[in-house]
Image (cartoon, rainbow, N blue to C red):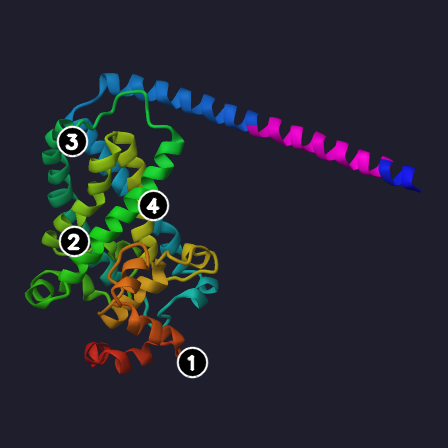
Amino acid sequence: ARVELMAETYMFESLMVEFGNMYGNMTKQALSHTDQAWNAFEFKWHEFFSQYHGVWATSLITLAIHEIAYFGCYLPFFIADFIPFFHKWKIQPEKSNQFFLQWRCVKQLFVNHFLIQLPIMLVSHPTMEAIGMTWETPLPTWRTLAWQVVLFFFIEDFYFYWIHRLLHYGAFYKFIHKKHHDHAAPFGIAAEYAHPVETFFLGLGSILGPFLFGRHLLSLWVWLLFRMFQTIECHSGYDFPWSLSRLLPIWGGADFHDYHHMAFVGNYASTFRIWDWVFGTDKKYRQWKASSAPTSKFVPELTGVYAKKSQ
């Protein structure tokens, strides 16, 4: 029996070693294929920008990426509005995303995107060149891009928290930020529905990370894709079981930011919950979540603001 046990143990160990070798080879092959694909992409990148580069090329491509990502990320949430199955995950189900609100939003977005953001992109091109931002190869590796995007999120979030909090004081709110709060129940593309002054100052936070630590056009563009997804998702008005905030506890998401629009106070950060927790600006939100019936009817008891808006 002892001999049989030793034989079985040996067979098991042999199988584990064989499995480990097979898994290792598969991983190496996958990484090799990834590197090959990246090298091919790098070649095409160099080929393209050797012919088309300069202020108009980089600015117009940046704007195109922004528009495609912005409206593309909103499309699934827009479709969800027409499918009753998804309505059970709508945070404020009593509020519908009416067409005239969305059309008003789109008109303001085109003003902000083409009359504010595009000129900023054009004007900032010399600054980008001066600080050493480049389009040339070699490109940042996908590993470098991964840690850069994470870093950029933390930089933007900290900047956004303080500027956003400032915009809720006195004249800053009355004459600038109030426009963004036209939507007490936001929908995805309402993310950049704002006064031009707000668009300018909050937009600076989005390029701060790439300017300081990116220094490559690809880093800026990859970050832009993730940033568009984040801002559309947190304004979407939907808290799905697969939402990132359910997988990553520090992620704010739609549930966290929707409360800010519903109650008009607290939850000032754009991406994470960290700074609102550190500085105590999420207390009313946590009270609301801890209540036995977390609906918008509870908000007037916390702030008294929503009641005035509803009257």
The reply to whether the C-beta atoms of the residues labelled 3 and 2 are less than 8 Å apart is: no
Q: Nearer the viewer, mark 3 or mark 2?
A: 3
Which residue is nearer to you in this view: 272 or 174? 272
Which residue is nearer to you in this view: 267 or 72? 267
Q: Which residue corresponds to mark 4?
A: 72
> Counting residues from the N terminus, which is met first, the one under dot 3 or under dot 2?
2
Looking at the rendered structure, the secondary structure element under dot 2 is helix
Checking the image for residue 108, the label placed there is 2
Spatial CA distance of label 4 from label 3 is: 27 Å
Looking at the rendered structure, the secondary structure element under dot 4 is helix
The vertical placement of 307 against 57, above or below, is below
Q: Quadrant of residue 249?
A: bottom left
Checking the image for residue 128, the label placed there is 3
> What's under tag 4, amino acid-wise?
Gly
> Counting residues from the N terminus, which is met first, the one under dot 1 or under dot 2?
2
Residue stretch rendered in magenta on the structure: 7-27
**Image point 51% across, 23% down: which residue?**
32
Checking the image for residue 292, the label placed there is 1
> What's under tag 3, amino acid-wise?
Met
Residue 61 falls left or right of residue 145:
left
Labels in figure, total: 4
The reply to whether the C-beta atoms of the residues labelled 4 and 3 are less than 8 Å apart is: no
Residue 84 falls left or right of residue 61:
right
Spatial CA distance of label 3 from label 2 is: 28 Å
Does 17 lie within the magenta span? yes
> Counting residues from the N terminus, which is met first, the one under dot 4 or under dot 3?
4
Label 2 packing within 10 angstroms: few (<14), some (14-19), many (20+): some
Looking at the rendered structure, the secondary structure element under dot 3 is helix
Spatial CA distance of label 1 from label 3 is: 52 Å
The reply to whether the C-beta atoms of the residues labelled 2 and 4 are less than 8 Å apart is: no
Spatial CA distance of label 2 from label 4 is: 18 Å
